[in-house]
Image: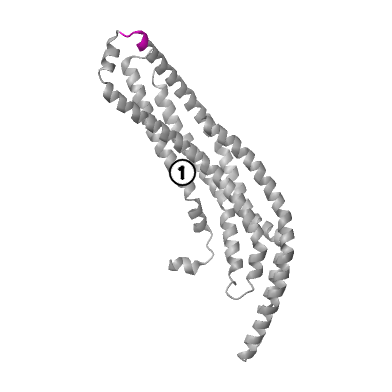
Amino acid sequence: MLVILFMHQVAASLSTQLDAVKDLVQDYVGALAVPAQLLCGLFAFGYIGFGIWGSWAKGQKIDFYGLLRPFSVGLIILFFSGFVSLLQLAVYPIELATSSLNTSVQDDYQQAKTNYTVAQTTLRNAMAAYNQQQIEEESSDVLTEASSTDASSTYLQLFKNTLHLLVSFSSLALTGMVYFFRTYVVLAGVVLSLIGPFAFALSLLPGFSDNIKHWVAHYVHVAMYVPLSLLVSFMVAVLFSGCVYPVFTNMLSALPPANYTFSDYEQAENLQLSIQLITLLFNGIAIALYACIPVFSKWIIRSDSKKDAQS
């Protein structure tokens, strides 16, 4: 729990720094657009000259509309920040809707998690009190019965410790996946914004004509990671608040809060073991959903339907 809390604090600081980086990058994008415009102007001469020469060589009419591409590319580079803002505006309504959807279940999720934590704490306190009672009553039959199976108890305890570590690691990985995508979206957006003007200028060269299409496709793919992450967070919150935590809480509340017998203690141990196994399973499902976000984004945004159909 301390590691997860520490990760939350680090991620909060990281989010603040990433926001500052985004603001700083906007200034650099404007500065880099100037040399990109110069390259675009140089490439425009070759593009227009090659187009006119190719039409004359084949005895065809000059396609003046096709020769306007360098000017349109130059305008995009000149107003590149506005062009990026238009792309962000296209994704913003989806991000706003998924954010509202995710926020609507967070209260229920936190309440269900709190109830489960309280029930789990009560169970652990009762089990600790039972263990302390058995230590004080060394001559009891229960202690004699338990000590007669030292070997099996050792292996069982080792399995429990291993399972507990796996559950903790899966919870940590699940939290890490959330902040990984937040960080990745910002960093990928920074890189794409910086190289965008040059990618657009290079699109005027032979063999690089698809640069603009590929850049836009990559940018929209990355931008879709945010609403998809919020949608997966919503699904995970509904899964845990509606299915996992209430069931666990009811099962834990069915046990007596104190004065355990040996059968109660044994049932509590089996219940904890079952809860950890189920938690590990659902954490794995949640991690798999986050890992599939890039695939989901490609399903939604397809830059070339012909190639996708062939593949």
* Region rendered in magenta: 134-138
* Relative horizontal placement of residue 189, taking residue 110 as reference (left or right): right
Please give left or right for residue 57 compared with residue 34 in the image.
Answer: left
Q: Residue at x 62, y 56 (%)?
A: 191
What's under tag 1, amino acid-wise? Answer: Ile
Q: Is residue 137 magenta?
A: yes
Element type at marker 1? helix
**Residue highlighted by disc 1:** 287
Q: Quadrant of residue 69?
A: bottom right
Which residue: 37% across, 14% down?
260
Residue pictured at 34% horizontal, 30% vertical: 159
Nearer-the-camera pick, 297 or 203: 203
Q: Is residue 42 above or below residue 140?
A: below
Residue 225 in picture, x, y percent from top left = 56, 51
Q: Is residue 75 visible?
A: no
Position in image of residue 103 (x %, y %): 58, 39
Q: Position of residue 112 (x, y in %)?
A: 50, 30
